Image (tube, grey):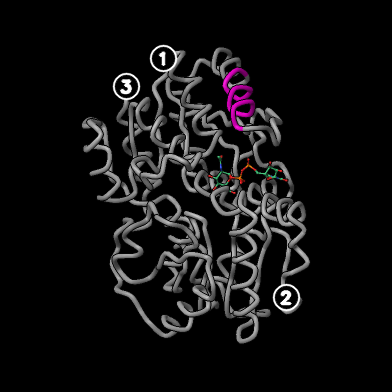
Amino acid sequence: MKIVTILGARPQFIKASALSNLIKRQKKIKEVIIHTGQHYDYQMSNIFFKELKVPKPNYNLNIKSKLHGEMTGTMISRIEKVLLKEKPNYTIVYGDTNSTLAGALAAQKLQIPIIHIEAGLRSYNKNMPEELNRVLTDHCSSILFVPSKIAEQNLKHEGIKKNIFNVGDVMYDLFTSVFSKLKKNKNVYEILVTIHRAENTNFKIKMSNIIKNLNELSNKYSILFPLHPRTKNLLKKYKILKLLDSRIKVVKPISYINTMYYLKYAKFLVTDSGGMQKEAFFSKTQALTVRDETEWKETIDLGWNRLVKPIENQIFLKTEKFLNFYGKKRNVYGNGNAAQLILNTIRRLK
Ligand code: UD1
């Protein structure tokens, strides 16, 4: 069996590491990897291939920074050419980025069945590019691997009834293999911050408020802020990057293992990332999510995550309130063997 896997953005390199490394070790399935080039800086791409030993992509399409329509369209036409050449039995796509949707549309037009990993998530906010990407991808996929019961129910409510497999979260596989080995061997920070979502970064007012909140936090806590290139570019454009308090340690995006290290030893995470909300939950670190809604509702229900608006000193107040609060522990995202379960299912496919 031949599979073409389409990757393009940072979270997909992380998600692919567990499954691609399992596929590599057996003979019956050949995997061909396409990297669309959506993320291209060393810190956003190569570092993950190296650190997590993700097999090197067979194709790099080098499609960098474009408007959404142009980016997705260019990806579709370039991926189509590779699919026509490789003639795979299946295509694998992960998550909800423009690379996911482009891969799914290219494959669907050629009637190559799509396997969607991390299917079924919903924010029900259609203004998010990620929501559009994941809904459309789910509706053209043949096999849907979901990370949770809620994700499974979301699909069923939309009329997708067949070939849904709740295998747990693939990010949990990698997390469990790395986390216990992280010993305190360098600086730690009380608060880790990541912000990159368009719904925040595209608005100067929201970003100014986030900076004000972080500055307030820095009066009391040590803060590490690895800055996503999108966020950095926009803060510069709005001329507010220099307003960040100098006590906040601002660095380039950091590797997966370093991110898990700082998360493990932080008291709090402030984020708008989907993956980081979950990873905070896995590591039993409290999270504040600077968004109006989340796809990872279990993290809220179990008391490890809260939605917060970046107004006045909301982030500061919520941090103070939940500082020594512990949520409930439950394995709502599986047992850390999602990749193996996915591989077992794929092996049974015709
Ligand atoms: C994308 C995904 C998002 C995911 C995130 C993880 C979409 C619609 N969004 O958002 O779901 O959570 O990746 O990081 O696919 N840039 C660089 N260097 C890079 C990558 C990006 O400078 O290596 C800059 C470019 O100016 C680019 C901007 O960041 O225009 C945004 O990148 P893009 O890939 O469009 O979206 P993300 O915000 O990273």
Ligand 1 placement by image quarter: top right
Q: Looking at the picture, does residue 118 appear above or below residue 330? A: above
User: Is the C-beta of the residue carrying label 1 under 8 Å from the nearest atom of ligand 1?
Assistant: no
- Tell me which segment is drawn in magenta: 68-77
Task: Give the labeled residue for mark 3.
Answer: 350
Kind of element beneath mark 1: loop
Q: Nearer the viewer, mark 3 or mark 1?
A: 1
Query: Mark 2 near mark 3, Cβ–Cβ under 8 Å?
Result: no
Could you tell me residue 228's position as x and y percent? 67, 55
Residue type, label 1: Gln
Q: Which residue is mark 2?
A: 245
Which quadrant of the rendered structure holds the N terminus?
top left
Give the distance between the C-alpha atoms of the residues marked 2 and 1, in whole angstroms.
Answer: 53 Å
Q: Secondary structure at mark 3?
A: loop
Residue 187 vs residue 274: left or right? right
Image spot of residue 90 (x, y percent):
43, 24
First along the sequence among labels 2 and 1? 1
Q: Amino acid at mark 2?
A: Asp
Viewer-nearest of labels 2 and 3?
2
- Is 243 left or right of 154, judged from the image as shown? right
- The residue to which callout 1 is attached is 111
Question: Where does the image place residue 273, in percent across and percent down from the top left?
Answer: 52, 56
Going from N to C along the chain, the mark reached first, 3 or 1, is: 1
Mark 3 C-beta to ligand 1 under 8 Å? no
Give me the disc on residue 167. Answer: none
Badge 3 amino acid: Lys
Residue 204 in the image, given as x and y percentages of width and height:
65, 55
